[in-house]
Image (cartoon, rainbow, N blue to C red):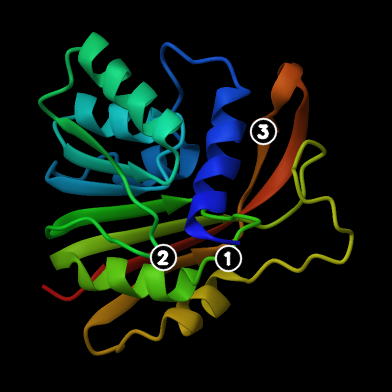
Amino acid sequence: MSTTDAATFWDGVHAARPATADPRPNLRLTETVTGLPPGRALDLGCGTGGDALWLARRGWHVTAVDVSAVAVERLAGLALSHGLDGLVVAERHDLQVSFPRGRFDLVCAHYLHTPVDLDRASVLRTAAHALRPDGRLLVVDHGSTAPWSWNQDPDVRYLTPREVAAGIGLDPAEWTVERAEAPRRIATGPGGHTAEVTDHVLLVRRAA
């Protein structure tokens, strides 16, 4: 699928959802980042912007990116309405083509799954190299299929966190895997439906 098609697909996904005035952050972000000193963060595939806004409220300077112009424009508006526009910069990027500039203390990629072509390993490798010394890369993937997931293929296999780390191919002398786990949680989907799901959590730290 082309870059244009990727943008069209995700614009359609976000346009079909009602705008949220105060989107919630992802649990795996809040449990990982709470207690860390604020710095510069990069949110890959920011979606509705809950993670970016949560980080900004805690003093992080956040660059939030998405392939969808709808998502980026909504997040920019939310940051302004919440008085966080000085801490959140929303940018449109197709990560197959461009990557945000800068060095970061935290890069997070939550559920960076897509039906369009995306070399995730290359994107995550670039993200790891964008970390400052002692910075962290947090990758949270689906480890199970929720009833409302767009991919209901019964034969789908989700890579384990260790397999994701191996695919990125980072030098263990410079990057350390701090967490590679598959915790479960109760998730809420469209219409308020709930289900138990598995997350695949990978946390990588660059040497100081």
Which residue is denoted by mark 3 in the rendering?
Answer: 187
The crowd level at tag 3 (other Cα within 10 Å; few <14, some 14-19, many 20+) is: few
Left or right side of 2 for 52: left
Which residue is denoted by mark 2 in the rendering?
Answer: 96
Nearer the camera: disc 3 or disc 2: 2
The amino acid type found where label 3 is placed reads: Ala
Nearer the camera: disc 3 or disc 1: 1
The image's mark for residue 117 is 1
Which of the two labelled residues, at mark 2 and mark 1, occupies the earlier sequence position?
2
Which of the two labelled residues, at mark 3 and mark 2, occupies the earlier sequence position?
2
Instruction: Decide: is 143 above or below 128.
Output: above
The crowd level at tag 2 (other Cα within 10 Å; few <14, some 14-19, many 20+) is: some
For the N terminus, the quadrant is: bottom right
Task: Judge by depth and name the residue closer to the eye, 107 or 161.
Answer: 107
Q: Position of residue 186 (x, y in %)?
A: 68, 34
Q: Are marks 3 and 1 in contact (CB under 8 Å)?
A: no
Query: What separation in Å lies between label 2 and label 1 (alpha carbons)?
Result: 8 Å
Secondary structure under tag 1 reads loop
Quadrant housing residue 49 = top left
Residue 46 visible in the snapshot: yes
The crowd level at tag 1 (other Cα within 10 Å; few <14, some 14-19, many 20+) is: few
Task: Judge by depth and name the residue closer to the eye, 4 or 60.
Answer: 4
Task: Judge by depth and name the residue closer to the eye, 166 or 4.
Answer: 4
Q: Position of residue 118 (x, y in %)?
A: 52, 66
Query: What separation in Å lies between label 3 and label 1 (alpha carbons)?
Result: 27 Å
Q: Position of residue 128 (x, y in %)?
A: 28, 70
Q: Position of residue 146 (x, y in %)?
A: 77, 42
Left or right side of 159 for 107: left
Secondary structure under tag 2 reads loop
